[in-house]
Image (cartoon, rainbow, N blue to C red):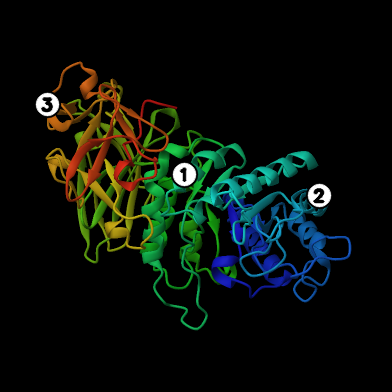
Amino acid sequence: MGWNDWAHYQCNFTAQTILDNARALVRTGLAARGYRTVTIDDCWMLKSRDSHGNLQPDPQRFPHGMKAVAKAVHALGLKFGIYEDAGSQTCGGFAGSGVPQGGGQDHFLQDAKLFASWGVDYLKLDGCNVYAAPGDSQNTAYRAAYRAESAALFEVGRHVIFSESAPAYFQGTPDWYDVLSWVRFYGHLWREGSDIATFDAKAPNAPRFHSVLWNYAYNLPLGRFQSPGNWNDADFIIGGDGGMTPAETRSQLALWSMMSAPLILSSDLGALSPAAISVLGNRAVLSVDQDPLGRMATLLRRTPSSDLLFKKLAGGSYAVAVLNRGEQPLHVELHAVDLGFAQTGCQFSSVDLWSGAREPSALTLQAAIAAHDTAIWRIRPAPACGAPARMGVVTRLASGRHRDPESYVLCMASTGKVEACSDSPAQRWTVTPAGSLESSGRCLAAANGMVLMQRCVSSDAQRWKYTLAGNLINRGDRLCLTGRSAQGLTLEICGHHLLDSQIWSLPNDPATR
């Protein structure tokens, strides 16, 4: 949790900008709520190194150097973060840490030592201009660069939180899931895709919520890559800034919290309204984000205008959220069975995390949700309710690169189709403890090279192995479930595991971790 200058200021900042926002974190009480790391993004350095090969802070922006800024941030009781790049130049064309184009010596260790001498606590390593030697793939080159940075940080002996941007440079390509599979070995958090929309001073009220929905759309299906200490980063919190309404501000914080995503504010903190500060500092919602289990929410249901999310929390509680993507108000009434509890008459205590309203013994959750808003509750079911089933929708990507959150994923249906998500009964699945996929009382099976629904029995033909890459491999014939929209569900030899048609997102298991 913290603050970064980029989404609001881009390159239009100075040391004073950074320190003004650091002081605002403390003054508004946001630092006391957990937002404690102040990070400077791209453009802070010159394009050339000094005669000793060291990075040079821009003297116009930082007349007293970077160590003075770090000292001032630390004096406020905050942590200090810096930006660099795994390539030869940053995305803005400034001096990078990586191998020069054409080959040569990198600066990872030299820069890590410099950062340690300044008192850096957090490093964001971007991925522009990474050089791949002849015969090496981009995947190989990126992995070598991020491994080298990780080793350099370890060698200097200072504990630094390492944020990796590598996956974002592969979104929509055949290597995306490969990169997502290795970043956890080197860093603590990582960006997977597109940057969130930046503030435009010439059009300060230009809408930005579509960008929030897009980042949520591509982050949500990646829960299998996340565990405590390794976090999927959906990019900056822009709630409260220009182009975001109060409802949209609530939605972004609620959605990021349901995903256990890093909460890194990126706005002019001094211009936030008291209402925005109240939302961004809501302790009850922040506790969902910072829950020690670190789970990402499961998508229980998706309609054309809404998402129902469910998240296991530590201590026997759960978080429930409903996003209204639509332009009209939405009324919801959720019963225990909608959340996976099979026990008839299951009761639970509930807290509306926005209003604080409590219900000690409820049978339903009800809310009127405004357009672009998100309702969020913490519930604690009675012991008689039992454990919730591992249930929800099963999705695959419709496309890896376009920025249309409404059609980014398709839903698997028990009719054998892969189709637009509509919350039809055929799109509701339960993953059984044995690894079967059940819908409407029947199980997905592989038989004679075909995919069909059968009466549920104990057989390998109805059991599926789910891999980190996202493949569903039938335990009977070892073929991969493949879902092409035109052909429906088929069984095929498992290809390179980045084929969109063979990558699935399953409900998280509420019984684990």
| Residue 158 or residue 381, whichever sits in front | 158
Q: Residue lying furthest front in this view?
A: 135
Q: Is mark 1 on a helix, strand or loop?
A: loop
- First in sequence: mark 1 vs mark 2: 2
Question: Residues under labels 1 and 3: Cα distance?
Answer: 37 Å
Viewer-nearest of discs 1 and 2? 2
Viewer-nearest of discs 2 and 3? 3
Residue 113, numbered circle: 2
Residue 346 location, x and y as percent?
A: 22, 29
Horizontal arrangement in the rendering, residue 375 relative to residue 164 (left or right): left
Quarter of the image for residue 14 reads bottom right
Question: Residues under labels 2 and 3: Cα distance?
Answer: 61 Å
Residue 362, visible in the rendered structure: no
For the residue marked with disc 1, what is the amino acid? Ser
In the picture shown, does residue 196 fall above or below 378?
below
Horizontal arrangement in the rendering, residue 335 relative to residue 321 (left or right): left
Question: Residues under labels 1 and 2: Cα distance?
Answer: 31 Å
For the residue marked with disc 3, what is the amino acid? Gln
Q: What element carries label 2?
A: helix
Residue linked to disc 3: 454
| Residue 341 or residue 397, whichever sits in front | 397
